[in-house]
Image: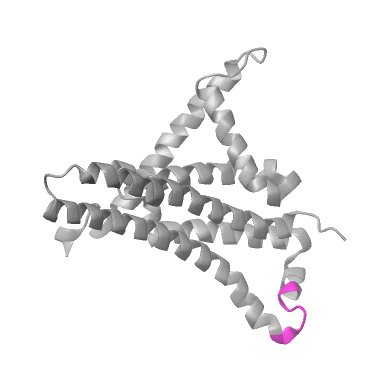
Amino acid sequence: MENNFDGIILTINGYDLELQQSVINWLILCALFAFLFIWAGKKFETADVRKAPSGILLVTEMIVDVCKNILGDNLQENTRRFLPFLGTLIMLMSVSNLLGLLGLQPPTSNVSVNIALAVMMFLMIQYNAIKKAGFKARIKELAEPLWVMTPLNIIGEFALPISLSMRLFGNILAGSIIMMLVYTVFKLFLPFTVLMYIITPFLHMYFDIFSGFLQTYIFFTLSSFFLSEQVCETEE
């Protein structure tokens, strides 16, 4: 079984820690984005506000605007408050979903990565719900409209992280498997044809680019919607 393992194994005090390729790719992306944020931050500090942004400044502003559009419809005036955290995750997830274009395993094809992201969203929602009205009020809210509905309401709360993680996992993994099968078929039956170079770009456009961005949009649109129910003022 170890021969099929695609990551690295670290032995710490006699305990083997297995890091799959998808997790390693995620950690590398985190390091690269940390460097990018530090570099962009220094550029913004020394930028001349009288001149139009260019280069990394222009790209950064465009990315921030996209993140605002994804979160803004739901979070409204609270968008700026959650933008640093959620915006960073949006960028990380978007890029990670595109790693299949480089022949790498997307981190979001690993269910453990997706569960970790979904649990973070769940905890953020629950924390803000308790912070808004207190722990007792949150328990009372779960018992509405009738106390007999409490188990169903609790199941509904836990359904969110399960739904977020499984939807993302299923779509990204399915795309990776389909592309692997396509290349296997071409390799076995059409080793000398140029047909592969005509078909595969369109398949990558759908399974890696379109599906990758779509799943990122769905993940954070749903997360920001449920978060907005706890941080945004309800209209009477």
Q: Which residues make up the magenta segment?
A: 141-148
Quadrant for the C terminus, please: bottom right
Indicate left or right for 203 with 59 as reference. left
Q: Work out whether residue 11 can be spotted.
A: no
Q: Work out whether residue 52 can be spotted.
A: yes
Colour convention of the picture: one colour
Name the spot of residue 107 as percent of width and height, x first.
37, 51
The image shows residue 136, relative to residue 32, as above or below, that is below
Residue, far right = 236
- Residue drawn 75% across the image and 71% down it: 136
Indicate left or right for 135 with 67 as reference. right
User: For residue 224, which quarter of the picture?
Assistant: bottom right
The image shows residue 55, relative to residue 134, as above or below, that is above
User: For residue 230, which quarter of the picture?
Assistant: bottom right
Residue, far bottom = 148
- Residue drawn 45% across the image and 65% down it: 166
Name the spot of residue 66 as percent of width and height, x first.
59, 39
Q: Nearer the viewer, residue 67 or 145?
A: 67
- Residue drawn 67% across the image and 12% down it: 50
Name the spot of residue 161 as percent of width and height, x first.
53, 65
User: For residue 132, which quarter of the picture?
Assistant: bottom right
Please check the rendered image and state whether residue 23 is part of the magenta-colored stretch, yes or no.
no
Name the spot of residue 214 as percent of width and height, x first.
50, 51
Quadrant for the N terminus, please: bottom left
Indicate left or right for 58 with 207 as reference. right
Please check the rendered image and state whether residue 142 is part of the magenta-colored stretch, yes or no.
yes
Indicate left or right for 226 with 232 as reference. left
Q: Nearer the viewer, residue 182 or 91?
A: 182
- Residue drawn 75% across the image and 72% down it: 141
